[in-house]
Image: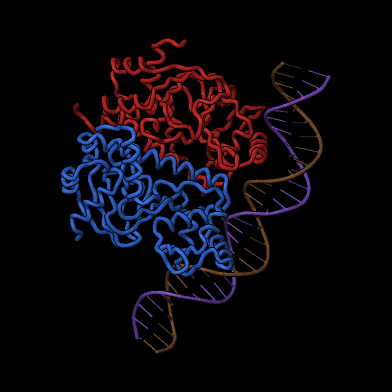
Chain colours: A blue, B red, C purple, D brown
Amino acid sequence: MIANAVLIDCLRANPVFAQLDDAALDVVLAEATIRTVAPGDIVVRQGDAASAFGVLAGGRAKMIQVTADGRQILLRYIVAGQEFGLIAALPDLAYPLTIEAVDECQVLYWPGATLAAYFGRYPQLALNALQIMVLRNQELQARYRELLTERVEQRLARALLRLAQVTGSCDKDGTLITLPLTREDLAELVGTTLYTVSRTLSQWDQAGLVNTGRERVVVTDAAGLEAIAGTAEVLPVSCVAPCALVEMMTAARAARTPRT
Amino acid sequence: MIANAVLIDCLRANPVFAQLDDAALDVVLAEATIRTVAPGDIVVRQGDAASAFGVLAGGRAKMIQVTADGRQILLRYIVAGQEFGLIAALPDLAYPLTIEAVDECQVLYWPGATLAAYFGRYPQLALNALQIMVLRNQELQARYRELLTERVEQRLARALLRLAQVTGSCDKDGTLITLPLTREDLAELVGTTLYTVSRTLSQWDQAGLVNTGRERVVVTDAAGLEAIAGTAEVLPVSCVAPCALVEMMTAARAARTPRT
DNA sequence: CGAGTTGTTGAAATGACTCAATGTTAGTGG
DNA sequence: CCACTAACATTGAGTCATTTCAACAACTCG
């Protein structure tokens, strides 16, 4: 069992609950269900009725989408503190993606109706949700554009840089991506084949840009990868550490309403 | 000048203002600024501070995004009744795309702060906005997946079918896409080159699937194109005619709150 | 009519995919 | 501890879809 204080911090760190006072957070947390999901198990399944909203309190998970012909793509990874299923607040919609636990995950759940009720009780939450969706939309648009205009090399370089930022840990001579990343995972993430990923990584390994192993990538020359990625673009929203995002959002909001 | 009744209908047809009573719509409309934009002129510019929210009351416009290296992609077309710039309700963000008028456009504008105030006054509007963003996100995710897994042929076929649904007018032996579409426009829309588009269309023209001309495409065999597009996927949200969307949404909402 | 935009088509180049064979690593159970 | 297995990774060769480049044809508009 995770301590309540940790869970509260988890909510406090999440942009959905930004600007909610501690008393309210206590109430919200009290209404949550907590569940443990084993590695490889499904948190929510694409196509199912979107009945619950959730926050990842521990562990990491991947958001994947399956195509009609069985291929699957990896949209992004979520880490502790990040939410999913805002869609559950709206009636009669289905989850557009599957979330699969990478590590053992602790997940806080609320029924969609409860989230909708929160929107009525704490109007700020609805605005927070809107902001999250707007920012996520921007990120997705940017990735769409990248996919349309850039090569595999560029996209792979950027993907590695992003992963290093979100789940990287300092290693001797580089940043280790702590996720267990197979070549196939990377391929699904950037939209290519595992063969191309393998070839490209081997090449970069020899050039000294990265250091690869089985399910392991260490970024040793971030600047070099950035050069390949091209545009030094702003880090997408969902890859910003939750705390940083909250700071950004509250700062922005404070600027808008100087006196409260 | 457009008659007030027409403008009110425009708002009523827009999902943002769904479930708002006529009196409120009058108030909202009274606070709007109307502007005419000449073909080819810019409605909002990517990178500018997102200061205004708008609804297209007449004409058609394209949403485009420019990459760092000058290439541009065409995200989608919007037609009368559709909104843009929900982002303006949030503080300190910039427009992520440029909107360029195709025809002469009539545009209703509200300052972002006014939209934010509406969210406070009419809480349903905030939920409507959230729903729109959630659905749009789903659509974008679907297109992202298509881009990752499908060929140019499939994507082009689907793009034509979508365009025919949104801006199609019945023609002898087919549906004429009324937008002035150059081969380059189509290329930017599906993410390819104008050469490939030209070749593919020529081929389809000979096969009797379409009927092409200068800046003109008539879909003569929709079933044939659907066969090429593959998955008979649900039409994406932003391509559903605004009225149909409203019906869908209000029906869904009614189902959720049976007694009001 | 001339100029500029738009569209077509061929030939060559190429990035990326597919297939197949093989090597490597981690984990399992005897 | 070792053989065995399954998952993961590498690499080469061939293929294909798509792009690129270039030349030319057709249409529109002043």
Q: Compared with residue A229, is residue B244 higher up or lower down, i.e. above or below? A: above
Tell me if A229 is positioned left or right of A79 in this view.
Answer: right
Q: Nearer the viewer, residue B254 or A184?
A: A184
Measured from the top left, where is residue A36 in percent x and y?
A: 25, 59
Measured from the top left, where is residue A218 in percent x and y?
A: 47, 65
Tell me if B173 is positioned left or right of C4 in this view.
Answer: left
Tell me if A2 is positioned left or right of B151 in this view.
Answer: left
Query: In the orientation shown, which residue stands out farthest toward the front?
Result: A259
The quarter of the picture where residue B207 lies is: top right
Measured from the top left, where is residue B36 in percent x and y?
A: 50, 17
Measured from the top left, where is residue B12 in percent x and y?
A: 36, 20
Q: Compared with residue A240, is residue A175 higher up or lower down, i.e. above or below? A: below
The quarter of the picture where residue B215 lies is: top right
Residue B153 visible (yes or no): no
Q: Quadrant of the C terminus of chain A?
A: top left
Residue at left offset 23%, top offset 44%: A111
Q: Nearer the viewer, residue A235 or A78?
A: A235
Residue at left offset 30%, top offset 35%: A127
Q: Nearer the viewer, residue C14 or A163?
A: A163
Q: Compared with residue A185, is residue A32 higher up or lower down, i.e. above or below? A: above
Residue A186 visible (yes or no): yes
Tell me if A149 is positioned left or right of A128 in this view.
Answer: right
Residue at left offset 49%, top offset 35%: B47
Residue at left offset 59%, top offset 35%: B186
